[in-house]
Amino acid sequence: MGNAFRSFLLYVLLMTGFGRIKCMKEEILVKVQELQFWDEKSTHAPRHFSNSMQIPRTAPKSSALLELKHQISPSSVNNFHEQLLLSDNARASSLQSQLRPPHFQQPVTRLPLTPGVALHTLNYIIDIKIANASMPVIVDTGSDLTWVQCKPCVNCYIQQKPLYDPSASSTYHPVPCNSTSCSSIFASVACGNMTDCGYSLRYGDGSYTRGVLALERISLGDAEVQGFIFGCGMSNGGLFGIASGLVGLGRTKLSLVSQTKAQFRGVFSYCLPSRVYNSSGNLILGSDSSSYKNATPLAYTRMLQGPRQAPFYFLNVTNVRVGEVELGLPKGSRVLIDSGTVITRLVPSLYNAVRDEFLKQFSGYPTTAAYLILDTCFDLSKYEEVRVPKLGLGFEGGAKMNVDVSGILYFVKKDASQVCLAMTSLADEDGVGIIGNFQQKNQRVVYDNVGARVGFGEEKCSYS
Ligand SMILES: *[C@@H]1O[C@H](CO)[C@@H](O)[C@H](O)[C@H]1NC(C)=O
Ligand SMILES: *[C@@H]1O[C@H](CO)[C@@H](O)[C@H](O)[C@H]1NC(C)=O
Ligand SMILES: *[C@@H]1O[C@H](CO)[C@@H](O)[C@H](O)[C@H]1NC(C)=O
Ligand SMILES: *[C@@H]1O[C@H](CO)[C@@H](O)[C@H](O)[C@H]1NC(C)=O
Ligand SMILES: *[C@@H]1O[C@H](CO)[C@@H](O)[C@H](O)[C@H]1NC(C)=O
């Protein structure tokens, strides 16, 4: 794209309402290899958690702390990137299609979206115990049913841990098909002569899980939840890696947050680690903020309410800051915050403005070919240090999320010969922006479902 066109675009944007406010010079001088999230050696000071689930001894039982880990195998990196970004795109498209006015009747089982992947994507995993067995599950704030692969399997993908076996558990109780819990979850179920409450979820990319709903005792850290409704998935396939299943942290009553509301008061938060290998952040259930290690005060913005929002968390973005320049959105822009999408998506007009401003401030570095959905790439292989403009999102009410330096550039090539701005554009202006997990790293993100607000505070959470 020529410079003339860019200036024209910027001019058009100025005319259509992006106010630009100049602030102080805001950039970060950073060693290129420190941005390299594939690097196998963490540069952060090690913070030790003696085991994978730990709760501070003094903390009240209304708070549980779980470790969040990247699940990545260092296999073919090229394939890996491609798969990662393509599946991320499938998820984002699927989210988009759900958020448009429906053209046809949605299936009764709601929630069709591309889930995060445990292996070969940048999704996050926690271990939960179902009955007595520990299971690694994908953390997903964009869906609500928690499910694991279950015996007897009709059709299961290969997973790392043994399958959950209901017949070995005295605390397993299938939800009867004619019960109110079954009919309240699925608006119209034809039970016929079925005794159990069957479910079937199909995600946007063709991934699926099918099985029966059941009650079981689960453990989250050292907190126990009795009679938790989950999916015992007997036929599952798609992009779940080798995780045992998925934990849904969305907004509806089926989600883990809602089901544990009596205990954890509808509040959870996480801090996503920036490194891929041997690093971990945490997921905290409960409103006790004493386990947070945020370095900047938490600032909250309200969750938007509205049609077609369940199970999603929508926020109102009112500005995007690139270095010293603030791109204002006087009318705000509805975005969804999601732990399961990797790369942040913005509507084209906003993305273009952000990208142009970034290019302007990150000037002098040689550009290089685009990579899949990432259109703004640089060859930084000749540099030891680069000056990266800071990025930040501002929300209704004044809350800000400063993107950690690890969330600005995406290393496609390990030698830094192709490093891309880690954001992308939606296909059209009617799309809904998504704040992906890449931009949420090293950040305490608090979801307060009772106060209907989401809070942000900077926090280094790549504990080794
Ligand atoms: C991760 O930690 C394990 C155990 O401490 C170690 O054996 C392994 O080499 C580490 N992997 C990387 C990629 O640093
Ligand atoms: C599961 O753990 C509970 C409590 O620790 C114990 O009482 C029970 O016997 C265990 N069940 C199995 C099947 O191991
Ligand atoms: C559900 O079905 C079972 C077995 O057919 C029956 O015993 C029970 O009363 C039914 N419950 C309700 C709420 O209809
Ligand atoms: C369910 O009922 C139908 C007819 O009412 C019968 O043909 C079928 O065999 C039954 N299925 C099972 C699994 O019992
Ligand atoms: C978002 O915030 C802006 C600025 O405060 C406000 O004008 C707009 O109505 C808000 N949008 C929604 C959907 O509430």
Image: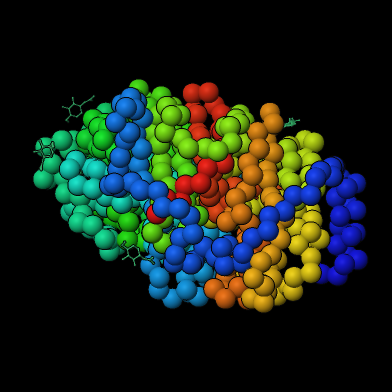
Question: In terms of depth relative to the viewer, which is nearer, 148 or 118?
Answer: 118
Q: Quarter of the image containing the C terminus?
A: bottom left
**Residue 195, how many percent across, how many down?**
20, 38
Instruction: Indicate left or right for 408 with 283 as reference.
Output: right
**Residue 160, how many percent across, how many down?**
26, 61
| Residue 173 can be seen in this image | yes
Instruction: Indicate left or right for 351 with 191 as reference.
Output: right
Question: In terms of depth relative to the viewer, which is nearer, 346 or 229?
Answer: 346
**Residue 405, how many percent across, how many down?**
61, 54
**Residue located at (29% from left, 31% from top):** 57
Q: Residue furthest front?
A: 45
Question: In terms of depth relative to the viewer, which is nearer, 313 or 282?
Answer: 282
| Residue 187 can be seen in this image | no
Instruction: Indicate left or right for 187 with 311 as reference.
Output: left
Q: Is residue 216 above or below residue 157?
A: above
Question: In terms of depth relative to the viewer, which is nearer, 200 or 350?
Answer: 350
Q: Quarter of the image containing the N terminus?
A: bottom right
Q: Is residue 107 above or below residue 62?
A: below
**Residue located at (42% from left, 33% from top):** 291
**Residue 408, how many percent across, how many down?**
63, 57
**Residue located at (59% from left, 36% from top):** 296
**Residue located at (73% from left, 73% from top):** 367
Q: Is residue 285 above or below residue 86?
A: above
Question: Colour scheme in the image?
Answer: rainbow
